[in-house]
Amino acid sequence: MKWCIIVNGAPFLTEFLGKVSSVLLEQGDECVLVFSSKLAEFREAQYYPKRARFVSEIDWCQKYYDASRKDYGNLTWRELFPDFDRAGSWPWGYKKSARYLAQQYQFFKEFFQQERPDAVLFEPPSGGAAQPASFVCAEYGIPYLGIIDSRITGHLDVLDAHFDNWMYQEVFRALSVTGIPPKEREFVEHFIQGFLSHEKLPSYLGVGKIRFGIFTYVLHYLERVKEIGGPLLRYFKGRRRFKDVDFESELRVRVALRAPWNLAFRQMRIARQKQLYQSLNPQDDYYVFPLHLQPEATTLVQAMPYVNQASVIQSIAFSLPFPCKLYVKEHPYAVGTKPDTFYEEIRRIPNVKLIAPNENMQELIENSQGVITLTGTVGLEAALAGKPAYILGDVFYDYHPLCRKLKNVDELQGYILRDREAGVSQGDLREQNVRFLISYIRNIIPGTTTLARAEKDTNDYQLIAAELRRVAQRRHE
């Protein structure tokens, strides 16, 4: 097979894909590495085998980008949105923004047309090169394999450009409860118990997250500067040649320079905002809305129309039956990241209650009428616990029988009223959950991206490579 691997310096994934590509090459496959920025090229090439073929998107754009071309098919500005929102303060106007998107589209269109890879390996589309790459993949019918650490600890998801995997539902529909091996059932039931009690959390939670502590953060920041200092110097030496083409590197540098100031503002907010939170009242008739950490792909891509969470909360709150309340729970990793005005806006809504991030989520769900979420894992928790989950974004678990996939907020009221009038039919919840999780587990791969950087890497890259090949071939069918 011929693989295209996109390289942009994503934490852990770079080292992981470097090891995967080594195995693919050993097995006789071809790997073409696409470096989406000069910083990635200068820093990340060390993790990949020399036998792989290296392609620089920046070099191509400097030589071949054609501003007069107008053939952009069905491309929309949506492909730019994740970078726009992540940047905080977008530094470019129409002309440069249009070039940013146009040159990436032109590059991948020409590259895929010439190379015709059998599959693309990267993270699920979340900004940068991934957005236009996945868009062009759809045009040419090339499977896009987005690798991410799974909700099941120690496993990997392989998602498509829509953060989905159609094989989950296929297995769920075909699965017979009586045909489930005892060991598989035991594993699933043990997982459900640990997941709902929060004894077992997904492996990506807590990894690479820097919480509070200025001293800890400063040490981390200095360590990162030391780590990428060489590539940064190389970039700045050639910046005059690159800056009008290498938008990704320019954005990364801007974000990195602002990071210490953002932390300082965050510390001040944390102290002020503690007093805003309220506690659970078991007597309340309420629904839970978990706030999302932003900026993240969970909102920027999977729920882009709802990225303004304050506005969404207002729409949801005024869609609830009277006299229901909406419990809005802050994300534990988002404490201090939002301005005071965000909380002031939602606290003005009369039936909204702002819940502290450390409130027990299991208890919140248990006492609620259900969970309303964009894409959060809390929706999965609710469904497994027997509560309805009303989903606005694109998530892998929305085929669970207790999930209600909404086209928009306007549909929410109808779904809630039907559930309240007719009651929520759980069926045999235990067997339903077992079938659901087995349909998921049978389509994920043992391993994690985070282990690729660990001293003792226990990933079985032979197995991972074989499974990726199987997924790519099935998506070709």
Image (cartoon, rainbow, N blue to C red):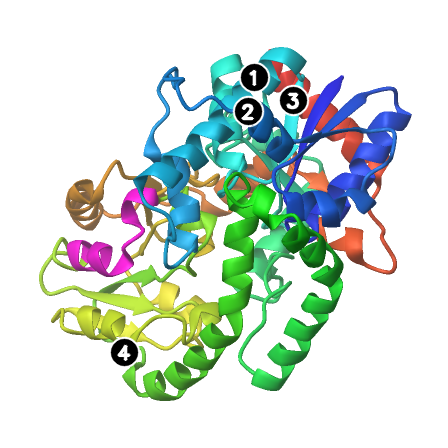
Q: Residues within 10 Å of mark 1 (few under 14, many from 20)?
A: few
Q: Secondary structure at mark 4?
A: loop
Res 392 visible: no
**Residue corresponding to mark 3:** 119
Which residue position holds label 2? 107
Q: State the separation of the CA atoms marked 4 and 1.
A: 59 Å
Residue 98 is situated, as x and y percent measured from the top left of the image, at 37, 34
Asked if residue 306 is among those painted magenta in the image, a careful observer would answer: yes
In the image shown, does 415 or 146 lie closer to the viewer? 146
Q: Is residue 352 left or right of residue 60?
A: left
Identify residue type, mark 2. Answer: Phe
Q: Quadrant of residue 466?
A: top right
Q: Which amino acid, mark 4? A: Asn
Residue 303, percent from left and from top: 35, 44
Closer to the camera in the image, 258 or 140: 258
Q: Is residue 43 left or right of residue 477?
A: right
Q: CA distance from mark 4 to mark 3?
A: 51 Å
Residue placed under numbered mark 4 in the picture: 281
**Of marks 1 and 3, the one in the foreground:** 1
Q: Residues within 10 Å of mark 4 (few under 14, many from 20)?
A: few
Residue under label 1, please give it. 110
Q: Is residue 363 visible?
A: yes
Secondary structure under badge 2? helix
Could you tell me if the residues under marks 4 and 3 are in contact, i.e. CB atoms within 8 Å?
Answer: no
Residue shown at the point (51%, 44%) measured from the top left: 247
Query: Is residue 235 rendered to the left or right of residue 130?
Result: right
